Amino acid sequence: MKYDFDTVIDRRISNSCKWDVADNELPMWIADMDFRTAPEIIAELKKTVEHGIFGYSAIPDEWYDSYINWWKNRHGIEYKREQFIFSTGVIPTISSCVRKLTTPAENVLIMTPVYNIFYNCIENNGRNVLECPLEYNNGDYSINWDSLEEKLAAPQTTLMLLCDPHNPIGKIWSMEELSKIGDLAYNNGVIVLSDEIHCDITDPECSYVPFASVSENCAQNSIICVSPTKAFNLAGLHTSAVIVPDKHLRHKVWRGLNTDECGEPNAFSVQAAVAAFNSGGEWLDELRQYIYENKQIVREFLSENIPQIKLVNSHATYLLWLDCSALNMPSGELADHIRRSTGLYLSNGAQFGNGEHFLRMNTACPRTLLMDGLNRLNKAVDIIEHL
């Protein structure tokens, strides 16, 4: 490989949220990577640092062009410049849209298990979480279409949060599935906010389907959240884009973001995004291959050493969803036992809704850390087996 993903970098000295743990602990929970971002991005950020003036920033044409070209060349959809709005992040956008597009006590629909912060965005703003649990069979998840249709048809349901690719299960929704979701939402007057932040972290030879590319119903009734932060490990720079094809809906989203003061870039956020999309493609392709190989290592290790834990089928994200039901222990209790007995810090699946008896593991790390984590997991399960 041209790029280095094997070197272990000490993050304990960097005020890392992920690594704010005890000395003997190994965090594999929160969704950021233990790799330096692409050197092409670092080079651009160095130019900004060397300039030495960090005043207020405007949004230049190259920011729009970088997003437009990336999605056209990588994902086969050509968005228009006027459809874009800068935002400091996907979560600020979701919270703003919940406040702007719904009223207190209305339903915001989510398909669970799903990114746990979705709950915060809904509940903290006085709206009701309406869960449509995904069905789990033979290591794969599917949509209960009757339940989804019923809940979208409820008069109190006004917004749906879609995760594509889906965190934590790593599923890439098909065009047929997205089309059906889009039609059901459109016919019931429910706006779809599609969180596509994980779209560039897919297995090699795999790609996701942008929700807005599926049909006119999907495009004109949707808010699309995208960002380079997950793919290029830039979360701390607070940079993202919101794409809203319908001009009337776009105005509401724009007003919400500006009212909430999360529509202005910092001195690094524009340059980082431009560098990522204009110059980071080769680095990203090597990263995807490295993560894919990490995931195969996990699959083989579990099969050979911890058959009690099953790896859920997935083709996206660097997050693995582990089926621990054979251990017959609630996921919160299991996660606590693993951390207490070995120092391995995994995410408790229950917090994602419909995730009892599951754990989430972040595999975006050098291979030595990955093997350390797997050996700790093996030790923790062995302790359980001998209780």
Image (cartoon, grey):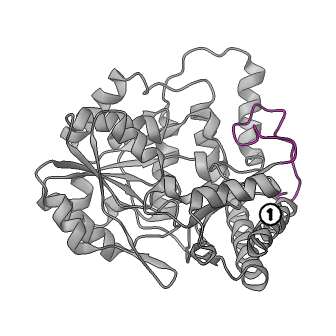
Check the picture and name the quadrant holding the C terminus.
bottom right
Q: Which residue is mark 1?
A: 370
**Side of 306 relative to 236 (left or right):** right
| Magenta-colored segment: predominant secondary structure | loop
- Quadrant housing the N terminus: bottom right
User: Could you tell whether 184 is left or right of 126 in the image?
Assistant: left
Q: Residue at x 31, y 31 (%)?
A: 254
Q: Give the image location of residue 14, x and y in percent.
A: 79, 32
- The residue at the point 21 percent across, 34 percent down is 104
At 56% from the left and 34% from the top, the residue drawn is 238
Q: How many marks?
A: 1
Q: Residue at x 63, y 29 (%)?
A: 268
**Residue 54 seen in render:** yes
Q: What residue span does the magenta drawing correspond to?
A: 1-24
Could you say which is closer to the camera, residue 228 or residue 119? Answer: 119
Note whether residue 346 is visible.
no
User: In the image shown, does 327 or 136 lie closer to the viewer?
Assistant: 327
Location of residue 163 by image quarter: bottom left
Residue 22 x/y as whole percent? 82, 40
- Provide residue 285's location: percent of width, then percent of height: 68, 64
Q: Is residue 277 left or right of residue 187?
A: right
Element under label 1?
helix
